[in-house]
Image: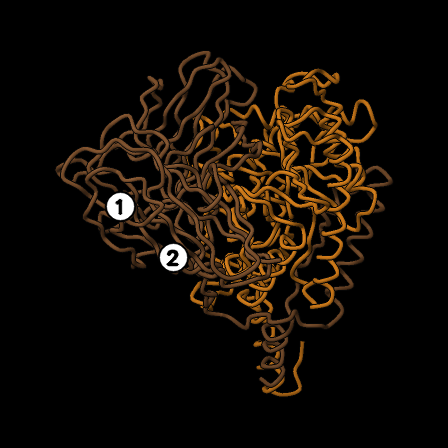
Amino acid sequence: MRFSSWRTRTKFVLVMAFVFFLFSGFCFDAWGVHWCIVNGECQRADDGNRGGGGGSNPTPTAVPTATNTPVPQPIAPRPTSSRYIATINPGIHYNVGCARGLDAQAGVIVLDFGQPDLVGTEWGSFLFDDVSFAPIAEIETAVEAYIEGYSDCRPIVVVGQLVVAVGTNNYVGTTGFSAEMYYQHGRAWSEMINRLGDYISARAYGSIVRVAGANDIETDYSPSHYARRWAEGFDGVNDHVFYNFGDAGGCSPYEASNGPCNNGWTQSDVWYVSWGVISAVPLPQIYLESGLNAAQWQKISLYSELSHGYPMLIAGTLTQLKACQDRGCPTGTANSPSEGWAQMLYALNSDARTAQEELKYSSDIGWDD
Amino acid sequence: MAGLGLSAVVAFGTPPSPGPEIAPFGISERDATKLPPDKRELWEKERAEIEQARNSGRTPEGLGSNPRGLRTPVPPLPAPTGIVEHAIGWKYFAFNNAWVGVQGGVRVNVYAGHRIGEPGKGVVLIRRFSLQMEPIGHDTIIDAPPDAGTLRIIEDRGWRLTLASASGSTFVLDLNAASLSLQADGGSINDNMVLDASGEAGGIQPTRNVSSGNFTIAIEQTLNPEPFQGFQWQIAFDAGVLAPVSATSNDDGNPTWDSDPTGLTLCAPAAIDTGAPAGTTWFGGGAGCAGVSGVSFTGTLARITLACLVSDGSTTEVRFVAPAESQFDFGSTFLTSSGSMMATDLGSSITVRCGP
């Protein structure tokens, strides 16, 4: 290649050097942390072997079975920090969202507002620890403050999008609530998520934040038809998906023949509230260090393939290491985020019928920062 | 060089890109080929929305405006106190109800129920928080004796809770004890103080509606298994709803509603105390009376006049301050001849509503 002048040649060399930096590892310091450009993405570089995910979405390679060829090992995404919500104070939510922004987190984050509740004619949730009712309008305000804090404190250069998944659960206990009330709650929750979506659009947060519903659906929390009705209620008016970040309690880790789970549930019930309903997406709890949870969910995905012709695709995993550190937890339930994520990915790819190329999300739930 | 400089500005100074790949609800382009048609349709819709947001050229409101992460100040949060009747679900527990108390700037939540899926295994869980709801320490989990069954908090006696089990047993949880334990309630009864929302009406009233202005509540004693030689009281309420006006403790012969606990002649007036959490008034302090010999008595110990500061329907709990809460050895308790505190059962809070 010939250049018309030394100036042109110098310019070419510098541009090529910049392109090289972009795609091969240019690092700099900003916002008090060390950043690197990796494969064209700006990422935090303080996360050790997690690949400096910075909330970006690395692309782990599927694990082939039975091969002697060395393959690239999948890299777990940098985990986000989900949280049990004990208060709806907007100031606290701004601060927590700000902390997530400063940390440049991206991926999915669950804000778990607790169990469905109703006071008068007003739907809401019964918060964790606050032993008090939080009306939906105030939950909405709290989430808005969280998003505002995230945007205000998020470094401009960071890539990656945060999905704020606003969660409840299916606990019925002795509340006296009916399955029909769960349908109404699901509907009201979905409408709240829609309004939060409008809020995000109005403030142009859409390039950095999305919103979704979420439900910690657990087999021991209610009869299955309660959870089914909640999911149908959500699905009836939704503009957004909801993540089932619950369990497959008591379901088989070995069989996929619609076997029984705890509390009268079946694998089909877990599948329905995780994937069967159009707006449902699974983000399962992979708490057990033994790998049992991952095996249970892989069998739900296999059940989906065998019974409905499509595997159930899993968005990511939820672990509770931080909650265990904050509060303590039963022995054997403290998978680290990368362990939970790896267990799930390996379980899915142990069978070609449930194999996924990628497992995008990894989140760890806790009580405090 | 100019071209490179422009490239750098474009790369680092414009609205952020969420990354090269769009993966609606965590499903990558490659995996999306396995989606059923209805899910695929939703996936495409999400992808289009994300692309539209990316390409809109709009900068997210406030993006990067707080690069140092300055925090919004959060005042102490109001804490409900007393028994909360609500079924509460946890990952490993099913709770029938809960109790909340605040002591020395620490909020304590106690939950009573059973291990989930095992209704025979009664359990109590205790959690502590700051007044900003930051968790303090690990959970304390106390299992009831085998086959006790699920537990429920049935009585709030200050920092001693009475719990009933499904099998019919009764337990006492002493939160002031150095080590927390569930003990079978042997039926021991202490001298007690009970708040009466209506100081003028008969009986013990748990609630009071006040349209505006002043009103009177009372402290009653209904149980007196042990003679006492003095008493002191201290109450707490929302400083934004109520203000103290005056108080009279029951001494010997004065005032006329006095039913004369023999020998209680040395009385101290009530005052507003320092040390209360923000937003809360502690009233009473060393208020009370003492005498020279043991007294056996049931009846009114004190009458307290309060004023509603608002008339918008706001409510507040009025409750006893336990001795362990008070930084100056105040609190509500009976006293022995040596002036030391006797075991005293403090009744539940009352609710006052100010408004039409």
- Tell me which chain the residue with mark 2 is part of: B
Q: Is residue A89 visible?
A: yes
Q: Quadrant of residue A215?
A: top right
In what quadrant of the picture does the N terminus of chain B appear?
Answer: bottom right
What residue sits right under mark 1 in the picture?
A: B253
Which chain is represented by orange in the image?
A: A
Q: Name the kind of residue labelled 1 in the image.
A: Gly
The quadrant the C terminus of chain B occupies is bottom right
Colour of the chain lettered B: brown
Left or right: A211 with respect to A25?
right
In this orientation, does residue A78 appear? no
Kindly identify which chain the residue marked by label 1 belongs to: B
Residue nearest the viewer, comparing A360 with A170: A170
User: Whole-percent x and y of residue A231?
Assistant: 76, 37
Q: List x then y, in percent, for residue A200.
A: 70, 62
Q: Which residue is mark 2?
A: B281
Up/down of B101 relative to A259, above or below: below
- Image spot of residue A235 (x, y percent): 80, 42
- Residue A283's quadrant in the figure? top right
Asked whether disc 1 touches disc 2, contact meaning CB atoms under 8 Å apart, the reply is no
Local crowd at mark 1 within 10 Å, few (<14), some, or many (≥20)? Answer: some
Task: Specify whether A229 is left or right of A150.
Answer: right
Identify whether A264 is placed above or below B46: above
Asked whether the residues under marks 1 and 2 belong to the same chain, the reply is yes
Residue closer to the observer: B11 or B48: B48
Q: CA distance from mark 1 to mark 2?
A: 30 Å
Q: Amino acid at mark 2?
A: Thr
Identify the residue at horizontal 56%, vertical 43% (top origin): A127
Indicate which disc residue A88 carries.
Answer: none
- Report how many numbered discs are placed on residues in the image: 2
Q: Secondary structure at mark 1?
A: loop
